[in-house]
Amino acid sequence: MAELKARLHADLTTAMKARDELTTATLRMVLAAVTTEEVAGKTARELSDDEVQKVLAREGKKRREAAEAFDAAHRTELAARERAEGGVLERYLPAQLGDDELVELVRAAVAETGASGPQAMGSVMKVVQPRVAGRADGRRVSDEVRRQLA
């Protein structure tokens, strides 16, 4: 079993014993998503830590988007719940890049590819995405690339 998945299971057990409803519900949801990912496709397989990390990032993104939608609909109690679930998920995700670090990564990628102008955005994104790898939201990365190429 992947180390991260084992940690999720252990933390779920701890949260259940502590009667922490928010953490229990969130970890159950994540583990269900991991299991769904494992059995998707033609054959069942065990996910690696990187793949579990991607599932966690995807679930975190869903929580952020849901919170924004609830805020737009003036459903603050539901938005607060989604943000709280996102906070639980952030414990298992790598630390997010700061703005300065992101600017430097994009600047290096632009220099490396020799890109100039917005039409070269795709080539810069191909270089930046593996370096960022879950440490920054794709929208933040693309906005920074667009800003530097403009």
Image (cartoon, rainbow, N blue to C red):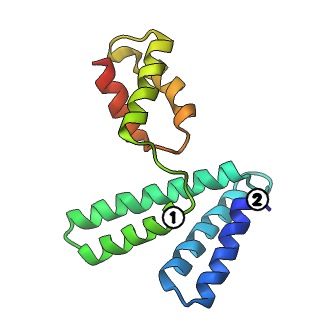
- Residue corresponding to mark 2: 2
Element marked by disc 2 = loop
Q: How far across and how far down the image is residue 137, in percent?
A: 43, 44
Does residue 39 appear anywhere in the picture?
Answer: no
Question: Three-letter amino acid code at disc 1?
Answer: Leu
Q: How many marks are shown on the rendered structure?
A: 2
Quick one: 70 or 7, which is closer to the camera? Answer: 7
Crowd rating for badge 1 (residues with CA inside 10 Å; few <14, some 14–19, many 20+): many
Q: How far across and how far down the image is residue 143, in percent?
A: 33, 33
Residue for point 41% across, 15% down: 120
Q: In this view, does 79 lie to the left or right of 28?
A: left
Quick one: 101 or 59, which is closer to the camera? Answer: 101
Element marked by disc 1 = helix
Q: Is residue 114 left or right of residue 130?
A: left
Q: In which quarter of the image is the N terminus?
A: bottom right
Relative to 59, does residue 95 appear above or below in the rendering? above
| Residue 56 lies in quadrant | bottom right
Question: Three-letter amino acid code at disc 2?
Answer: Ala
Residue for point 53% across, 24% down: 127
Numbered mark located on residue 73 in the image: none
Crowd rating for badge 2 (residues with CA inside 10 Å; few <14, some 14–19, many 20+): some
Of all residues shown, which one is farthest toward the front?
100
Residue for point 38% across, 69% down: 82
Relative to 6, does residue 114 appear above or below in the rendering? above
Question: Upstream in the sequence, badge 1 or badge 2?
Answer: 2
- Residue corresponding to mark 1: 89
Q: How far across and how far down the image is residue 140, in percent?
A: 37, 39
Does residue 95 appear anywhere in the picture?
Answer: yes
Q: How far across and how far down the image is residue 51, in percent?
A: 66, 50
